[in-house]
Every structure is written in structure tokens, then in C-alpha cells.
Image (tube, rainbow, N blue to C red):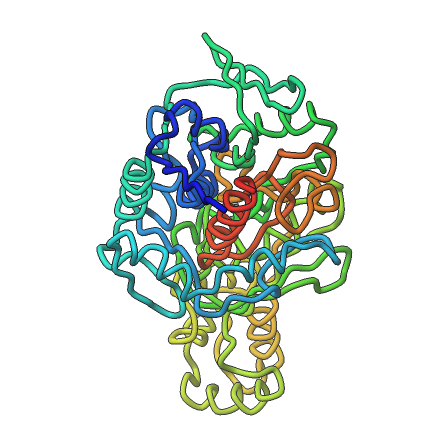
Amino acid sequence: MKVFILSLSLIPVDFMEVFVKTIAIIGAGPAGMSAAIAAARKGAKVTVFERNEIAGKKLLLTGNGKCNFTNVDMHADFFSFEEGSHAELVMETMSTKAVCDFFADMGVLSTERKGCFYPFTGQSQTIQSALVKTMERLGVKLMTNTCIGEITRNNDQFVVHTDNKMMNFDAVILACGGKAAPKTGSDGFGYRLARGFGHTVSRTYPVLVQLQSDASNLKMVAGVRCYANVSAWVNGVKVASDYGELQMTDYGLSGIPVFHLSRFLSKEIEEGMHCEISVDFIPQISKAALNEFVSERIKTFYGEPVKTFPEGLVHSKLVEYMIKEQKIEASAMVLPENKDMLINLLEEMKDWRFLITGHKGFENAQVTKGGVLLEEIDENMQSKLIKGLYFAGEMVDVDADCGGYNLHWAWASGKKAGEEATK
């Protein structure tokens, strides 16, 4: 029996291209670029459509331009997604080490500070540039300044309609981002594309965002930064807490702990629930120890004005603010007979309440809460409704704390979608 071996070099290139899968990725953000690299490495012919003039425009702003891209402590407790969804499994397909290795393979050294990983250069541009250059090396076609009108189906093909042409693809990955920071192009357009294929998009809310309060005299403390325990309360129930640097503003509260707690309040604020932030300005002193602490402190500050009593405990502007809010007379002195008043002052400092009346909106938010329902997406990030349609990143209903978690989700979900779309 004769065996004939056909050399691939004898097969016409145009014939071989029939077997190469073509993939369109809508959005050149972190998830879109991760998907493009993963798909191209599997041999797919990838085209990325981006409405902005550059890829990764929002990425450049991440972490105040420093780009915290993952975290040592990576687990589901830092994320919010539908119970029973595949999001946790997708997230775990890339470990913290895998993400660091992903960038190391592109020539990016990383450094860790307090559990957060950054490029060693301290510049988000390092990450953005590495992703773009890697796509170029892999032959990914990046079409910037390109808006998508619609995506339709033609038999087994997807037809992407741009401003001036129509292009056919075997698979499409929607990685359009959410609605946070619309000035970077994230205006929720991807949700319209998802709905066009029959997908359900839950109501969206801005999170990792500053919170507004109608508390009086906030201008007295605007600009003050202090470390504190901060708790979120909804209709009288404590729903979350965090410790970190709080920033006082003339409109309300900001800082990392407030950003974290906004994930538990944005929706509730818009639904008209009673929302409060409780701040413990002196967490180093327990409530149980206040009586003895005040007694000893009276000895130190005996006969001095009450406004001197909290000195050394909190910022001087906070002292003035709290004395005014408590309506303590300027003539009041630190004396044993005023002990109850002094204890009450410190008790208030340990549970200072701010009624939260709003948030600073998508314009100032870092992330979107809500999006395409995970129940309509399988464990491979593929639509359960339309074969060949995939999702990645912020446009699905997943959000997380500050600290590199949202970017980790972008890398992991993008990689998963990109690899699976080639099959």
C-alpha cells in the first residue's frame, strides 16, 4: 500500500485561510485586548474595533495612572456576581501569578505594594503599550476611530456594520465596557448590541464612586484626610464596613473605603432607601475603654477649653467641625463635672453619621454595577442564546472592590472568551 503525504506548503494560502477562524472583538479595553491576544495565540484572525483614537484609553487612567492590575488576595469575597454563576470559575482560570506572568511575557516587570500589583515603572502606559505591541506582533488588526452601527447574523456568520463597510466574522466578542467614565468611551453602547441579540441587561449603577451628603458645615472639613473605620447602613441595618483613608469633601465623602462601600449603596440610594455612612474617627480607642480614657485625659487637659480635649486624636479641622455640630459652648472647660459631655463627644466621634443623599454619577465612577445577566452566559463566556457570541469584562454583571480586582476580571474573562471563541 502506498502512502502519500501532502505537504502543507503545496496548499494554496487562500485555501488554508478557509480554516482560519475570524473573530471580531468590539472594544479595545483591558478585556478586549486580553481576548485578542488569547485568540491570536490560538491562531485566529482577529480584528478589534475601537471607537477611540487609541486602545486602552480608560486603562491609562487606572489607579491614578499607576495601574493596579491584580492583587495577592484574589478570591470571590471581593466580587459581586449572581449566586451560582460561572463567574468565580472564570475568575479563577487566571491566578495572580498567571496575570503577572502574562505581563512578564510581554516584558513588563511588576512590583507589589500592600497586596496590590503595579508595573514596576509605576505607569499605566507600560501596561497599555505592552498590550498594544503584543497585539501587533500577533497580527491582530486594530481599527481605532471606528464606530459600530450594528451587528447582524447572516447564516452562521456575524456581520459587523461600521460607518462605511460591512465585515463578516465567525465569532464576536463584546468587550465594550460599562457606563463608568463615559468620557473614555464607556457609555453603555455595548448593552444595545447585547439586547439586539436578545440578551437581558440589568439596571446599571455607578460604583467605586464618591458619595454625597446634605450634612451641614462640610466646607469646614473639605480636604481633610484621615484613617478611619467606615460603615454603610441601609434602613438602619449595617451592610458593610471598611478601614482606610477617608477624604472629606464639600459635597460629602470620598476615599478608598467610601468607594468600596458605594458598591452597597448606589442602588439603594437610587431606590430611595435611607442610607448612612458611619465613621469611627478614633478606631484605636474601643468604646468600652472610653470611660477610663476620658478620666485620664481630664487630668491632662484639666481646666483647658473643651476644644483642646480631642487634640492629638483627630485632625484639628475635624475638632472645630465636631464642636460646632455638637453645639458645645466655647466657654466649656475640661473639668470632672463635664465628664459625661466629654464621653458623649468621643462616642459621637466613634459613630459620626452622615446621611447619604446621592453619588457622583457615572462621570466619576470607576466601575459599573449591573450589566448583561450571567445566567445567559455559559462557563466559557459564550452566549447561551447565540452560538459564537461571547462577552468579556465590565459589560457583564460583575463588579468588585478597588485593588486590581476589576482588572483581574477583565484579564481572566477576556482570555477565556478569546480562547473559547477559536474553537
Q: Which residue in the rendered view is the most extreme toward the left?
A: 121
Depicted 163 relative to depicted 377: above or below: above
Specify whether residue 326 is in view. Answer: yes
**As rendered, which of 30 and 348 lies closer to the eye?**
30
Depicted 411 relative to depicted 335: above or below: above
Image quarter hosting the C terminus: top right
Specify whether residue 30 is in view. Answer: no
In this rendering, would 174 be left or right of 238? left
In this rendering, would 337 be left or right of 306? right
Depicted 153 relative to depicted 142: above or below: above
**As rendered, which of 171 and 95 lies closer to the eye?**
171
Q: Position of residue 287 (x, y in %)?
A: 61, 82
Q: Which residue in the rendered view is the most extreme toward the front?
A: 1
In this rendering, would 379 be left or right of 254? right
Number of marks present in the image shown:
0
Q: Position of residue 94 (x, y in %)?
A: 49, 60
Residue at x 65%, y 63% (from the top left corner): 240
Residue 122's quadrant in the figure? bottom left
Residue 381's quadrant in the figure? top right
Q: Position of residue 69 (x, y in %)?
A: 40, 55
**As rendered, which of 308 and 4 lies closer to the eye?**
4
Q: Position of residue 231 (x, y in %)?
A: 61, 64
Residue at x 55%, y 62% (from the top left corner): 92
